[in-house]
Image: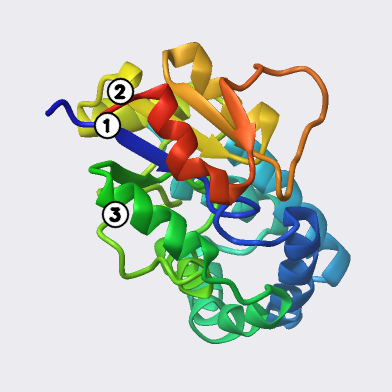
Amino acid sequence: MVERYALFDLDGTLLPVDLEFFLKRYVEAVTPEFSHLIPEKVFVKSLWEATYDMVNNLDPRVGNHEAFARAFESRVGVKWEVLWPIFQRFYEIGFPRLRKFVPDTSVARQVVGACLDAGWTVILATNPVFPEVAVRERMKWCRVDDLPWRFITTLDNMHFCKPHLEYYREICETLRLNPERCVMIGNDVQEDMVAKKLGMKTFLVEDFLIDRGGGEAPHLRGTLRDVPSGIETLLPG
């Protein structure tokens, strides 16, 4: 049997949360951790600007972690060796407290489990702007952390971000995948459906739909519960 790969986005797809709402809570929680070093307004502005720079870095020699570190350090005037341990401590202690802002769900586990039962290889294709510890924490919130993921994209192992096609190409090159044997499943028209340009099939999850206008039309669309049956029609086993 020829392998089939289901690439799942996390936030707003498997994890039932409005991303804009969640990121606001995240910034509110992490900012005080740096108050002894960086004024609040400077920290918040620098965090967003450095994230923007990282997302739009297309230099394959620079990983996402390094791209963010360079951009953030230069804006706040504090060495990364001082900053990173504070971020790490927050991700281990403070970040899990954000769980209260996310509804409890078993749907994600049921859906991914059904795909696994049907013979799909699953990949977590979340935008790699968080370190692995924060990605795995959010996976716990939707009960998919212990499933047999082939690969999980994180700040630590990727060089590109969504919506750039280079992000999807890097996944395929790293795992030696044929894009035509892949289905990208996500809730963001511009960030997730762009995988269609690489030759992947696409399924737009509408539960927490994000559409800024324009972008690639999905091959299929529906709720998260529709995914197992839907992707079978896109790439029959």
CB of mark 1 within 8 Å of CB of mark 2? Answer: yes
Numbered circle sitting on residue 181:
2
Colour mode of the rendering: rainbow
Q: For mark 1, what is the residue?
A: 4
Q: Amino acid at mark 2?
A: Arg
Judged by depth in the image, the label closer to the viewer, 3 or 1, is 1
Is residue 57 visible to us here? no
Marks 3 and 1 in Cβ contact (< 8 Å):
no
Q: Earlier in the sequence, mark 1 or mark 2?
A: 1
Which residue sits at x=61%, y=22%? 218
Seen at 54% across and 53% down, the residue is 10
Q: Is 227 displayed left or right of 19 in the figure? A: left
Q: In front: 164, or 49?
A: 164
Q: Amino acid at mark 1?
A: Arg
Q: Measured from the top left, where is residue 207 in percent x and y?
A: 71, 49
Q: At 42% from the left edge and 36% from the top edge, which residue is drawn?
A: 159
Of badges 2 and 3, the one in the foreground is: 2
How crowded pointer 1 is (Cα within 10 Å; few <14, some 14-19, many 20+) is rated as: many
CA gap, disc 2 to disc 3?
Answer: 17 Å
Q: Which mark is residue 14?
A: none
Residue 81 in view (yes/no): yes
Q: Tag 2, which secondary structure?
A: helix
What percent of the width, then of the height, locates residue 210?
76, 39
How far apart, in angstroms, are the residues tagged by discs 1 and 2?
A: 5 Å
Q: Which residue is mark 3?
A: 149
Reading the chain from its start, which is encountered first: label 2 or label 3? 3
Task: Pick the quarter of the image with the N terminus.
Answer: top left
User: Would you identify the image quadrant in which residue 104 lies?
Assistant: bottom right
SS at badge 3 = loop
- Which circle's residue, 3 or 1, is located before the other in the chain? 1
